[in-house]
Image (cartoon, rainbow, N blue to C red):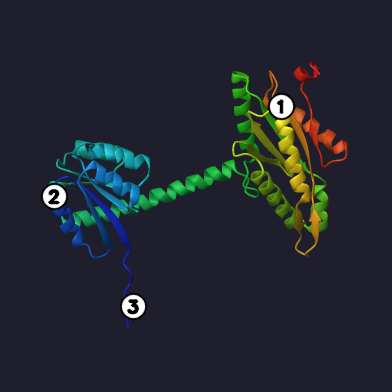
Amino acid sequence: MTQKMEQPLIKILVCDDDPAARELVRTCLQRITDREIVLLEVGCAEEIQDALDKRRIDLVLMDNQMPAKSGMEWLAEISKKHLAPVVMLTGSGTEEVATQVFQGGALGYLPKGSLSHDKLSNTINVTLDKWTRLQQAKADRQKLERLATFDSLTGLYNRQAILAKLRELVNLANRYKEDFSLILLDIDHFRRVNDRHGHLTGDEALEKIAALIRGNIRDTDIPGRYGGEEFIIILPKTNLASSWVAAERLRSIIEKTKLKDFAGNVFAITVSQGLVGWERNDDTASLISRADEALHKAKEKGRNRVQILLGPSLRDKV
């Protein structure tokens, strides 16, 4: 017994205020046999908006001359939001109109005067193929952008991206004199973790620390992997006193967290943190340098601690 192949299902939204025009489109669509079509017909702006808001639409057949809001205006909105591919149906089949609708974002175009089953079916197939390729290209671009912005192991901002975020905060602080703080966090004795438990466990430890950082800071705070076992956390609009509380809380949470290697051995890790605050005339390099100095002091004092280092302008006041 031959099994019948399941036909692809698509939802088509037909937007036309003329019932006769909708009937013509419906008749053409009913003759399409290589797809299962769910047809939605609307004739006014409220019905179009309701359909776009409440339903997943695979294709829009839009009349160019719609009341209240023109087809070109709907095209611009649908294209901007990437809601669905649009085929424009126009009363005039001039080259000028065709150029206008394609420049507006339409992926297909048909004059009503020459509308037929074959032309509509072919236009739908071509339009959906274009849409699929455009969506794949968009996904590929987003993947490349993510690879360029985020660390592949931890999912946090990578070194380049977190330094770019820091530069943005420095510029805003120098312009608007808004406090922010910077934490440079380093896993204590991380080489021992790799030597004793293996590099795969070391990678898991980095992922765990990243997850703990992400889960125990504010939504407005900005974490990134600075390199190796070092992380940066930027705390916008936060003074040193409040930042120390946040850093100390994170240190305590990490200290109490238990990890397990592939042999079942349970172990703990600790972190040292250098904490600095933005001061007048600071730039990215001076902040990083001061945070790194604070981190070294934290390690010199026994590790597993938060060390604050004031800049020259605050030291003079102490």
- Mark 3 or mark 2: which is in front? 2
Dot 2: what SS? helix
Determine whether, in the image, residue 24 is placed left or right of residue 184: left
Asked if residue 113 is positioned above or below residue 73 in the image, the reply reads: below
Nearest to viewer (mark 1 / mark 3): 1
Residue 259 visible in the displayed image: yes
Q: Earlier in the sequence, mark 1 or mark 2?
A: 2
Q: Quadrant of the N terminus?
A: bottom left
**Quadrant that contains the C terminus:** top right
User: Which is nearer the eye, 186 or 87?
Assistant: 186
Mark 2 — residue?
A: 19
Amino acid type, label 3: Gln
Helix, strand or loop at disc 1?
strand
Q: Residues within 10 Å of mark 2 (few under 14, many from 20)?
A: few
Residue 165 vertical position relative to residue 318 in the rendered view, above or below: below
Where is residue 24 shown, x and y percent of the image?
14, 54
Find residue 147 and report its image quarter: top right
In the rendered view, tell whether residue 160 sits above or below residue 115.
Answer: above
Residue 197 image-quadrant placement: bottom right
Provide the secondary structure element on which disc 3 rests: loop
Q: Which residue is mark 3?
A: 3
**Left or right position of 88 against 115:** right
190 in relation to 280, above or below: below
Q: CA gap, disc 1 to disc 3?
A: 69 Å
In percent of width and height, residue 64 lies at 20, 41
Residue that appears at 76% across and 39% down? 248
In the rendered structure, the answer to whether residue 251 lies left or right of residue 141 reads right
Q: Which residue is mark 1?
A: 277
